[in-house]
Amino acid sequence: MADDVTPRPDPLAALAAGAEALARGADLDEALETLVGAAAAAVGATSAAISLQDPDRPDAELAFTVGLDEAAQADLVAAVASPDHPLTAAARDRAEIADAAAVAYPLIVGRGGIEQSLGAVLFVWAADKPLNEDQAAFLRAAVDLAAVAVDRSRLASTVAERSEWFERLAHTDPLTGLANQRTFARVLELELARAGRQGSEVSVAIFDVDDFAATNESGGRDAGDDVLRSVASVLAGAVRLVDTVARLGGDEFILVAPGSAGSTVARRVLDGVAELPEIGGRRVSVSAGVARFPVDGTDADAIIAAAQSALERGQSAGKGSLETAAG
């Protein structure tokens, strides 16, 4: 067979192109395609493919290909389902696997002294094409760079997920998943400011679980936590999209409802809680107090105090009672 005289990219230029794509923060697929495509061209490979190992799945899956049309891609997807396919075996065994016309390299990174497989890269030639030592070393370097790219992308995703988780923790009650007191205070101030500008109303309702201490004593802390989570679930399901519910702490919850519908929403909560099954051998009920801005107060402290007073009157009237600040 005649020698291939088609000009090829310089291997160093191929690595430089891939490194530049990574350094410039390109999308992972774009960076890998640039790197692997340049590497394939530098050694005369007609196609290449990458499989990636999802941490939540047992097997590596085909991520993308270079130099294959749709039909060939579909054939490769079916082929890599075989455990003996070079791309699959290289990722699984963390080993280089080669034959006369193809070679697969595992994507390996080390962390804490332990090697992890992130997938594999496959290079394919149209006919038998043995690699010399320099070409093989070049491809291994390109694959190592690809492994760094995949690892960096996953670390960035992990950092983003953790940041989102901590942000969520900062604004939610860990037991119930509702907003916490700090978040509620900010929302209430914003709603009061908006209502003041627009000349509208805001309702605030405070809910307290009836005989919560008795539930804790008879059923233990687990039963008490179950009560709080169940009440929180009813609250979350009963309110409108514009409403905000939070846990104040202990067995108290609070609602801010733009407009004058606070009493209606509060009644819906009481009725929903009343339908809960027994927890710890006891029926669950809540009492509520509702106050409105600006009728019952002109700032957050005054509105909350008015709702708290209404709640105390409701508790005096009996379990499952609802009272308004206006009486």
Image (tube, helix red, strand yellow):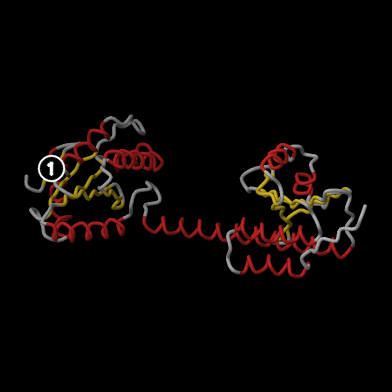
In this rendering, would 275 be left or right of 18? left
Residue 99 drawn at (x, y percent) = 87, 48
Vertical arrangement, residue 58 with respect to residue 188, above or below: above
Give the percent coordinates (x, y) of residue 256.
22, 50
Q: Please count the marks in the image.
A: 1
Looking at the image, is 270 positioned above or below residue 248?
above
Camera-side residue of 55 and 299? 55
Residue 189 picture quarter: bottom left
Q: Quadrant of residue 313?
A: top left
Badge 1: few (under 14), some or many (20 or more) residues near its Cα, within 10 Å? many
Q: Position of residue 89 (x, y in %)?
A: 78, 45
- Placement of the C terminus among the 4 image quadrants: top left
Horizontal side of residue 215 vs 262, given as left or right: right
Question: Disc 1 designates what residue?
Answer: 323
Q: Which residue appears at 75% of the width and 38% of the height?
A: 79
Residue 319 screen position, x and y as percent: 19, 36
At label 1, the amino acid type is: Glu
> Which is nearer the eye, 83 or 249?
83
Which is nearer the eye, 140 or 326? 140
Q: Is residue 173 left or right of residue 41?
A: left
Residue at 29%, 50% in the rendered image: 246
> What residue do we see at 7% from left, 53% from top?
295
> Considering only vertical position in the picture, is 220 above or below 294?
above
Callout 1 secondary element: strand
Considering depth in this image, is 229 or 179 the residue closer to the camera?
179
Q: Quadrant of residue 321?
A: top left
